[in-house]
Structure formats: structure tokens, C-alpha cells
């Protein structure tokens, strides 16, 4: 099984007979619109094709994904319900889930958990792997700007969501989680708290845009906790995540 980094929080999973595209924002080409690993390879890959979106924010959901059905009429869309509520797609466009709900067929199961922003986080059960995509779940606070009360609330809200996940999934094989240096000095706090609470075999940073160094800076903390850390160096990079 392979994990492909597309861009920002966008990834793809390539498994035997199935491809998943997660939180697509832009393709992996840095110079040409709609060129890269998704358009040039994955949309033509044989087998089942699923597109998952955790919430409506434009850096996680690009409505262009709905046009892919013209090329792949067999495509499966599983979206968080906020995308429907914010009218980014219509009722017939996708199967919609929110916290506490699941999608399941004979290929995979997707459990929706909460977020500390909007939408959902997803736990994907695929071919014996438990793969978590956090969406915008994080301990979002800006220490240099937030008040103590705001920081405490962000911390409490985040740990509540993590405890809810832990009750169902105390361990995951892969976790894609925000490591975004724009938050300031404590930007890795949420990622650290996540791996302290949920045993994570492979940790994958995301939501860092072009700041690869900022995302990869979490490596030492992740490895000290026993995780295999995925250092991402460029868009379109592929990683083996087979057990």
C-alpha cells in the first residue's frame, strides 16, 4: 500500500484494486493547473476510486472533484455533511457523514469523528490498515495572540475530541495530522498530544503548505514517541505504508 502526498492536506492511498483521494485542494504540479499525480495517474488507475473530503474549507475541498465523474462514472464520493450544509455540493453528489456516522461497503469503512474547526476527521479501515485523516482537527491556538482563556478552551476542546476518538480507536497505523508553523511557537502541541493519546505507527505531517521544514520539524518528537515519521520533501512524493 502506498501513500501519495498531493499538496497541503491532500493525499492519495494506492492499495490493490482501490485508490482513495483525500482532501484534494490542488494537484501536485507546482506550475501547471490540473496536472500532477492525480490527473496524470490516479484518475486512470484501475480499480475502485473513492474521493473523501473532511470539510468545506477551500484548502480541503475543491469542487472540481465533482467533475471527475465525467471521466470516472464509477467514482464514489464520501463527504462530511458540512459540505452539503454550506451548499458546496448537492444531495445527490455524494454520500454524507458526520461525527458518529460511518460509510461502509465491501471494500472499506470510513468512520467520522469530530473536529475543533468545522466538518469531520475520518478513520479509514482498508485492507487491514487503520488510516486517520485529521481534517482540521487540531489544538488551534496562537500563543503569541490568544488569551489564556482562549488557549485553555482550545486545549480542552481538542483533548475532548481526541478522547472520543481514543474510545473507538486507541491505535492507528497511519495518522495524517496538521503541523502548521503559522500558528506560532506551540504549533506542534496538538500533534504531540495526539500521539501521546493514540498509539500511532506512522505519522504524516500536513497542512503546512510550502513550509516543508516546518512540517518535518515534528520528526524528532514523533520518533521519540515510537512513530515512523514521513518526511515530505515535494509534491507528488510516494511512500510505502505497508505493514
Image (cartoon, helix red, strand yellow):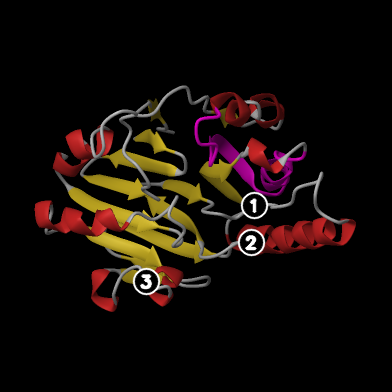
The answer to whether the residues at label 2 and label 1 have Cβ atoms under 8 Å apart is yes
Q: Which residue is mark 2?
A: 116
Residue 164: x, y in percent? 65, 64
Segment tinted magenta in the rendering: 186-211
Mark 3 or 2: the one toward you: 2
Residue 156: x, y in percent? 78, 61
Q: CA distance from mark 3 to mark 2?
A: 19 Å
Q: Residue at x 37, y 71 (%)?
A: 96
Describe residue 9's horizontal placement relative to residue 144 as left or right: left
Residue 102: x, y in percent? 42, 69
Q: Residue at x 75, y 59 (%)?
A: 154
Dividing the image into 4 quarters, which one contains the C terminus? top left
Q: Answer with mark 3 or mark 2, whichever residue precedes in sequence.
A: 3
- Report the disc number at residue 138: 1
Q: Which residue is mark 3?
A: 96
Q: Answer with mark 3 or mark 1, whichever residue precedes in sequence.
A: 3
Q: CA distance from mark 2 to mark 1?
A: 6 Å
Instruction: Say above or below: 115 vs 180.
Output: below
Judging from the image, what secondary structure is the residue with disc 2 in?
A: loop
Amino acid at each position: 500500500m502506498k501513500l501519495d502526498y498531493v499538496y497541503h492536506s491532500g493525499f492519495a492511498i494506492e492499495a490493490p484494486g482501490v485508490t482513495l483521494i483525500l482532501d484534494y485542494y490542488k494537484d501536485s504540479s507546482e506550475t501547471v493547473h490540473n496536472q500532477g499525480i492525480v490527473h496524470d495517474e490516479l484518475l486512470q488507475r484501475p480499480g475502485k476510486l473513492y474521493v473523501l473530503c473532511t470539510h468545506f474549507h477551500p484548502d480541503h475541498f475543491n469542487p472540481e472533484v465533482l467533475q471527475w465523474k465525467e471521466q470516472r462514472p464509477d467514482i464514489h464520493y464520501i463527504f462530511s455533511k458540512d459540505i452539503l450544509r454550506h451548499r458546496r455540493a448537492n444531495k445527490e453528489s455524494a454520500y454524507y457523514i458526520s461525527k458518529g456516522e460511518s460509510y461502509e461497503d465491501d471494500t472499506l469503512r470510513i468512520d467520522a469523528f469530530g473536529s475543533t474547526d468545522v466538518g469531520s476527521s475520518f478513520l479509514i479501515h482498508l485492507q487491514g490498515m487503520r488510516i486517520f485523516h485529521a481534517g482540521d482537527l487540531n489544538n488551534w491556538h496562537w500563543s503569541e495572540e490568544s488569551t489564556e482563556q482562549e488557549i485553555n478552551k482550545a486545549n480542552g476542546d481538542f483533548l475532548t475530541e481526541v478522547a472520543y476518538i481514543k474510545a473507538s480507536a486507541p491505535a492507528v497505523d497511519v495518522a495524517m495530522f496538521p503541523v502548521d508553523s503559522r500558528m506560532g511557537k506551540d504549533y506542534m502541541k496538538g500533534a504531540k498530544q495526539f500521539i501521546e493519546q493514540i498509539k500511532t505507527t506512522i505519522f504524516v505531517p500536513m497542512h503546512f503548505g510550502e513550509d516543508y521544514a516546518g512540517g518535518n520539524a515534528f520528526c524528532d518528537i514523533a520518533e521519540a514517541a515510537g512513530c515512523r515519521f514521513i518526511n515530505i520533501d515535494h509534491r507528488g512524493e510516494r511512500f510505502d505504508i505497508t505493514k
